[in-house]
Amino acid sequence: QVQLVESGGGLVQPGGSLGLSCRASESGFSFNTMAWYRQSPGKQRELVAAKGRYGSPNYADSVKGRFTISRDNPKNTVSLQMNSLKPEDTAVYYCNAQSGTSPYTNYWGQGTQVTVSS
């Protein structure tokens, strides 16, 4: 069973920066896509950013220009650099890795809290 372990997160003031990192228990090359999702109280989990094996990453419109996803397959990691944070970015952030062919297998981290508040 693949395990995803997240680190980072915490409390930051509006306009500040924070970085999240996620390490997988197996080779990053085995995953089609690695991504970050987030979920706020009372809301559905939403995609924040995703990076496939090849090509450019995808971002939610709300984070474009502020967040950057990076993927390091040899190190089995995916990271999310968050800049110019806003209170509405407050959420639990989840690492996701997808493998196989349709129907795909999705793996999830345990989640890490990000709170943007003064």
Image (cartoon, rainbow, N blue to C red):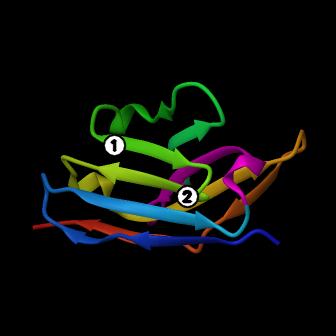
Q: Secondary structure at mark 2?
A: strand
Residue 16 can be seen, yes or no? yes
Q: What's the residue type where badge 1 is placed?
A: Phe
User: Residue 5 vs residue 108: left or right?
Assistant: left
User: Residue 9 vs residue 4: left or right?
Assistant: left
Near-viewer residue (43 or 73)? 73
Task: Quarter of the image for the C terminus: give it.
Answer: bottom left
Image height of 7 relative to 66, above or below: below
Task: Quarter of the image for the N terminus: give it.
Answer: bottom right
Percent position of residue 5, x then y:
57, 73
Residue occupying image coordinates x 29% and y 32%: 65
Residue occupying image coordinates x 35% and y 70%: 9
Residue occupying image coordinates x 27% and y 60%: 18
Residue occupying image coordinates x 66% and y 64%: 108
Marks 1 and 2: in contact by CB < 8 Å? no
Q: Hey, which quadrant is residue 79 in on the image?
A: bottom left
Percent position of residue 4, x then y:
63, 69
For residue 14, the mark is: none
Q: Which stretch appears magenta? A: 27-44
Percent position of residue 51, x then y:
57, 38
What residue sits right under mark 2 in the picture?
77
Q: Secondary structure at mark 1?
A: strand
What residue sits right under mark 1 in the picture?
67
Percent position of residue 36, x then y:
52, 52
Image height of 64 relative to 33, above or below: above
Q: What's the residue type where badge 2 is placed?
A: Thr
- Cα separation, mark 2 vs mark 1, equals 17 Å
For disc 1, the neighbor class at 10 Å (few under 14, some 14 to 19, many from 20) is many
